[in-house]
Amino acid sequence: MKFSKIIMFALVFSATTSTYLNAQNQKASQTVKYDFLKGLTKANEDDMSDQQIMLDGESIPVYSADGKRVRGMEMMQLMTFSGISPDFYLDAEKEIRAIILNVSEYDKEQSNQENEQVRQPQQDQVGSDAPDFSALDMNGKTYSLSSLKGKVVVINFWFVECKPCVIEMPELNEIVEKYKSEEVVFLAFAMNEKPKIESFLKKHTFDYTILPDSGTVIRDYKIKSYPAHIILDQNSKIGFSIRGLSNSTASEIDEAIEGLIEK
């Protein structure tokens, strides 16, 4: 079987030490053979000028640099690396048929460290009083901080276009199911307006109580990255806060809820 040969060049620009640059230069090019690239050609800048790309991992297959197909959370995490460089491969009709996400080991390590910091509980928030809120859910029911005192309140901040937010929903739904008989309330404050969320829910299941058009609440909680999770204890104090997408997010939320229930 004949395989296409792809030459990949890693062009690295950095203000770090020359030692790092020399190490990268040694890895500047490598020949990789993949069966899924047979019959495809690597796109150049002109090829991509009028292309519309659906980078969801399904419409167009997406692969890591070692040829492994990646989807969902794994793909989104790979795309967070600061040194990511996507290569697009076209068929004879100039349609994109495969995408390879290349990332230098240096940038991958750096990004992993940054992501771990992002996904750590926000210690400056934990223990502080939660900002007050009053918002309507999809059915017009009002939820306010004062009415929820005495309960553990699990809050998710999200928006429809946020792929990582959508990816983690099945795991969040499992947590809702686990604590449905407990004194735990699950609220999802969304940036989007009600009609857009209604359309979204025709294709996706999200078991949190969704509160649309919640920009004011999101600003009050100083949310600047998504998805974001905050858990309030029975006294309306922040007991847990985390940002970003991670394989461990759901388990960390679960542990935080258990810890607050047992207090």
Image: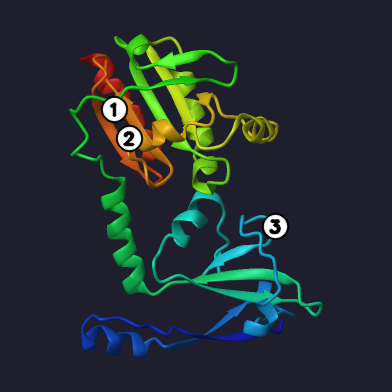
Q: Answer few, some or many: residues within 10 Å of disc 1's Cα (few below 14, many 20 plus, some between 14 and 19).
A: some
Query: Residue furthest toward the right?
Result: 93
Residue visible at 35% across and 43% down in the picture = 243
Image quadrant where one finds the N terminus? bottom right
Residue placed most toward the observer, 136 or 263: 136
Q: Alpha-carbon distance for marks 2 and 3?
A: 31 Å
Q: Residues within 10 Å of mark 3 (few under 14, many from 20)?
A: few
Find disc 1 in the rendering and name its residue.
Answer: 256
Alpha carbons under labels 1 and 2: distance apart: 6 Å
Q: Please say which color scheme the image uses.
A: rainbow
In the image, residue 199 sits, relative to residue 2, either above or below, namely above
* Tag 2: amino acid: Glu
Disc 3 target residue: 59
Q: CA distance from mark 1 to mark 3?
A: 36 Å
For residue 99, the mark is none
Q: Position of residue 149 (x, y in %)?
A: 30, 11
Residue pictured at 62% horizontal, 83% vertical: 45
At label 1, the amino acid type is Ala
Q: Is residue 31 left or right of residue 51?
A: left
Of callouts 1 and 3, the N-terminal one: 3
SS at mark 1 in the image: helix
Residue position marked by numbered label 2 in the rendering:
252
Viewer-closest of 90 and 16: 16
